[in-house]
Image (cartoon, helix red, strand yellow):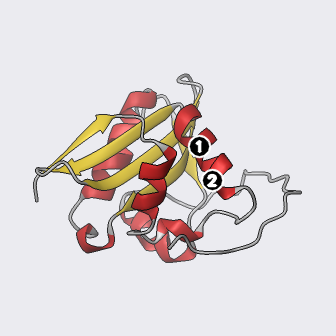
Amino acid sequence: MEFVINEERLTADEYIDFLKHTDLGSQYPKENFEERIATLVKKASISLVARDKEQHIIGVCFGITDFAYWLFMTDLGVVREHTGKGIGKALVKKLHELAGGEDNIIMYTCANENAIPFYEKIGMGKADDVMVLNKINWTYFTVE
């Protein structure tokens, strides 16, 4: 499958529409969803978009980084009918490279239980050194 990955900022509406076609749309809380997505797409340190030859969005990857030591991949999604074609792996690789490369940058992510086999396949492992402070309201829902 032919696709191109570019650094690109999506609008909130474009990203919300994309989420409807992925399994990523269930990772966000319902509270202030649209406002928070608008902030996410505007402020992520790195914003990558994979497009097919017809310029349709088929994958998205966002990361926050200091470009010196740390990278946190906040979002990785591929349109359902295009999973298993190397798009997610290519997005992760490009994200890591843009942040500074795997020789310099430690990459973390919060993985959905169903995505753990994918992350293990691309060489990521579970971490024992991550701490969490979570006091936000979180009502689970799926973007449809």
Provide residue 19's location: percent of width, then percent of height: 45, 63
At which x and y percent is residue 48?
Answer: 37, 40
Q: Check the image and name the residue furthest to the right.
A: 135
**Residue 62 drawn above or below residue 57:** above
State whether residue 84 is above or below residue 133. Answer: below
Image-based side of 85 in relation to 7, left or right: left
Residue plotted at (23% across, 59% down): 86
Query: Which residue corresponds to mark 2?
Result: 34
Q: Position of residue 74 (x, y in %)?
A: 56, 49
Mark 1 residue crowding within 10 angstroms, few (<14) / some (14–19) / many (20+): some
**Which residue is at a point 57% across and 71% down the rendered structure image?**
26
SS of the residue at dot 2?
helix
Image coords of residue 51 (percent x, y) = 23, 49
1 and 2 marks in contact (CB < 8 Å)? yes
Disc tally is 2
Judge the density around disc 2: few (<14), some (14-19), many (≥20) Cα neighbours within 10 Å: few
The residue lying at 56 percent from left, 64 percent from top is 111
For residue 110, which quarter of the picture? Answer: bottom right
Front one among 99 and 78: 78
Using the image, tell me which numbered label, if any, was put on residue 38. 1
Callout 2 amino acid: Glu
